[in-house]
Amino acid sequence: MVMQILLGPQNPVPNLKQAVDRINSDGPVVVISAGWRDSEGEIDELRDITGRSLEDLKLYQRAEEVFSNEPALHELHRERQDKLRELQRLYRIRLAPTITAARKLMRTRAEPELLRLEQRAAITQLRALDAHHLRRIRGIHLNFNERRSALEVPSAQIQRDEVHSLVKNAGLILIPGGHVAVLLNRIRLFGLDQLLAQKPVIAWSAGAMAMSERIVLFHHAAPQGKRDAELLDAGLGIVRRRVLLPHAGSRLDWRNRRRMALFSRRFSPAACSTLDNGSMIQLDNGRVIASSGSSIVTRTGRKRVLAKT
């Protein structure tokens, strides 16, 4: 049995202890806090909350050491990141008019049968753009992996072996939030994707997002104004058919049902699942066996309590 528990932000009231108590594991507990970057490894609060002995993998620090010792790998990594940033810029240029057209069609009035087909076509175009962008992202990652395999990087291999040993011996993995792109980069750099899929994992906020197939950035009420949701990256793919939405209560405009309906239909058939403070989704081999404080965004833009499957 491989279990994952997804949580919302741990402030102001943490529910991490309740999640840890749900997983019966006597093995070591390791933490991947690379998303915290310069605050990586500051896990005393997590120790206090869980009441367990924890060891941080320090992937961010290990990566910095590897890059300093392996300039060819560092240059390859920077090249990939530059390509991803440029690709994201190009994607946004295409996204703006595509999503604007879909949004206008969601709120316009016309003969119902005519309008319904045009709305469906606009959403199909939006999905196609997202799918194309995801293929391009995966292609860049694949190219990086192929070119990396041809490099001689002894210090990277030593670090990778150490990290793999710690994960293989662990009884539970904790993945906090932070910067989701940095977190994913470090997990991929050390080749932990498949190992994490075989371990009980508790992940929250950006850590939960990293577990999914697609990383979707969203904020309907950002300080700089409303922003369109955008596909940022491929996730680890451990949690499937689910778009995870931390801070959904403050970042989604639930009053605008048309906007929320478009959001849901755009990412269908994946279920758009909220993760606010106090939320918990417990998965057993991909099946929801328990949940609390989490909702699904329906096709009509309403909330529906996430139920067991």
Image (tube, rainbow, N blue to C red):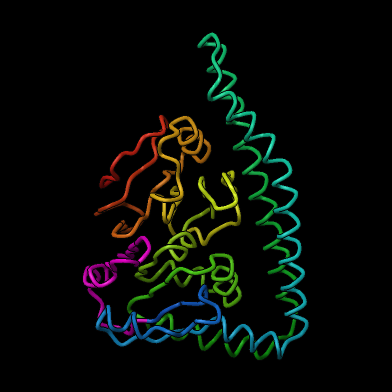
Magenta stretch contains residue 134: no
Write the residue at 25% across / 72% down: 17
Height in image: 269 above or below 141? Answer: above
Residue 153, percent from left and from top:
70, 86
Write the residue at 59% across / 31% down: 124
Magenta stretch contains residue 23: yes
**Quadrant in the rendering for residue 185:** bottom right
Q: Please identify the quadrant where the C terminus is shown.
A: top left
Residue 96, percent from left and from top:
68, 39
Height in image: 273 above or below 155? Answer: above
Q: Please identify the quadrant where the N terminus is shown.
A: bottom left
Left or right: residue 287 compared with residue 145: left
**Mark count:** 0
> Looking at the image, which is closer to me, 275 or 255?
255
Write the residue at 74% across / 72% down: 78
> Looking at the image, which is closer to me, 193 or 173?
173
Write the residue at 36% across / 60% down: 8
Residue 161, percent from left and from top:
54, 86
> Looking at the image, which is closer to me, 165 or 278?
278
Residue 305, percent from left and from top:
28, 43
Region in magenta? 1-29
**Quadrant in the rendering for residue 256:** top left
Height in image: 144 above or below 226? Answer: below
